């Protein structure tokens, strides 16, 4: 619902004729645009991003070329963009990690997202699902919490690596529920999900695109999901607020940004192209298939979310003394 409202709110801006947009941005773009992905190729965010960039390329008349620069929890790629010229030819495409997580996990991340990057806009949100292994199908999260309190340390919860969003959410779940769970780190979400399906760990927070097939097959059980509303892909799964844990209403979101100091006309053109790309049937079909929630809207929306969630993650990381170094 929020995504629809923001896209509608941007409607008047999107109505600007193409000729007027081109005039506002001068001659930009005159050559290919490099889009830095701070993670390795593969995964749903990579494929989805290419679908969006194809539409932006069609709208702006220049190729959008993905430049993979993985490493150090997204900080290598993000720092590269932060050091690049603010001319619209180097962009950052990343999930939550680069915007509000990694800067607080590393002593010297090489950039400050609130100072060194220009928000272009949030493309989509990915609800996070708390899953349990087969044979551990509690009727509710409250029942899980009661069992965990009765036997502290009985349950294990996988994460996709130290400082990953699943790790942060596992830490927050233990804190707000007042339970003790054994955190088990993995080298990525794929291996963690594989071990959950195999029954080697009890619980795992994971993005919905990587969960639905396992829930539908009965290999894992979904307890609750983040987001403002239930997902059409998992309509029987209550939201974290419905389950009684509103503090866990955190999602993984995918966004586009640029170096600080990006000229306003180029920023406006980029934002409009992003919003128009989100309205394309091909992009909407991909989002529906992946159970992504469209967001869109103005750069200010993203800037506010970066400030708000950055403060939340910084507090969690500091209090739990989580570090990726």
Image (tube, rainbow, N blue to C red):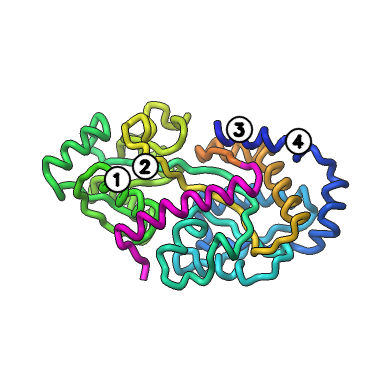
Label 1: which secondary element: helix
Left or right relative to 173: residue 149: left
Q: Earlier in the sequence, mark 3 or mark 1?
A: 3
Name the residue carrying label 2: 248
- Give yes or no for contact between labels 3 and 4 (Cβ–Cβ under 8 Å): no
Name the residue carrying label 1: 173
68 up-or-down from 312: above or below: below
- Give yes or no for contact between labels 2 and 1 (Cβ–Cβ under 8 Å): yes
**Extreme top residue here?**
236
Q: Earlier in the sequence, mark 2 or mark 4?
A: 4
Q: Earlier in the sequence, mark 3 or mark 2?
A: 3
Q: Nearer the viewer, mark 3 or mark 4?
A: 4
Cα–Cα gap, marks 4 and 1: 41 Å
Name the residue carrying label 4: 12
Cα–Cα gap, marks 3 and 1: 29 Å
Name the residue carrying label 3: 4
* Residue located at (56% from left, 34% from top): 2
- Is residue 40 among what the camera can see? yes
Is 314 included in the stretch rendered in magenta? yes
Q: Earlier in the sequence, mark 4 or mark 1?
A: 4
Quarter-wise, where is residue 107 in the image? Answer: bottom left
Cα–Cα gap, marks 2 and 4: 34 Å
Cα–Cα gap, marks 3 and 4: 14 Å
Label 3: which secondary element: helix
For the record, the magenta segment spans 296-325
Q: Earlier in the sequence, mark 3 or mark 4?
A: 3
């Amino acid at each position: 619902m929020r995504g629809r409202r923001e896209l509608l709110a941007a409607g008047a801006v999107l109505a600007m004729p193409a000729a007027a947009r081109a005039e506002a941005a001068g001659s930009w773009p005159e050559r290919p645009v490099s889009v830095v992905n701070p993670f390795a190729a593969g995964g749903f965010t990579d494929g989805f991003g290419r679908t969006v960039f194809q539409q932006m390329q069609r709208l702006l008349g220049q190729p959008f070329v993905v430049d993979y620069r993985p490493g150090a929890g997204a900080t290598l790629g993000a720092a590269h963009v932060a050091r690049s010229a603010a001319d619209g030819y180097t962009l950052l495409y990343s999930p939550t990690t680069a915007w509000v997580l990694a800067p607080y996990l590393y002593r010297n991340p090489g950039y400050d997202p609130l100072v060194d990057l220009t928000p272009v806009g949030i493309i989509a949100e990915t609800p996070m699902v708390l899953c349990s292994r087969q044979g551990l199908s509690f009727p509710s999260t409250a029942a899980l919490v009661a069992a965990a309190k009765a036997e502290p340390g009985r349950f294990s919860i996988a994460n996709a690596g130290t400082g990953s969003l699943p790790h942060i959410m596992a830490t927050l779940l233990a804190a707000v529920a007042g339970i003790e769970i054994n955190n088990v780190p993995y080298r990525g979400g794929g291996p963690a999900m594989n071990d959950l399906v195999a029954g080697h760990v009890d619980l795992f927070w994971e993005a919905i695109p990587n969960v639905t097939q396992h829930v539908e097959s009965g290999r894992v059980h979904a307890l609750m999901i983040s987001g403002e509303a239930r997902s059409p892909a998992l309509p029987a799964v209550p939201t974290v607020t419905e389950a009684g844990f509103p503090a866990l209403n955190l999602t993984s979101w995918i966004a586009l940004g640029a170096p600080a100091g990006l000229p306003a006309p180029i920023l406006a053109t980029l934002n409009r192209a992003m919003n128009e790309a989100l309205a394309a049937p091909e992009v909407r079909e991909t989002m529906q298939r992946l159970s992504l929630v469209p967001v869109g809207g103005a750069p200010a929306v993203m800037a506010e979310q970066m400030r708000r969630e950055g403060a939340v993650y910084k507090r969690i990381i500091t209090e739990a003394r989580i570090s990726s170094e």
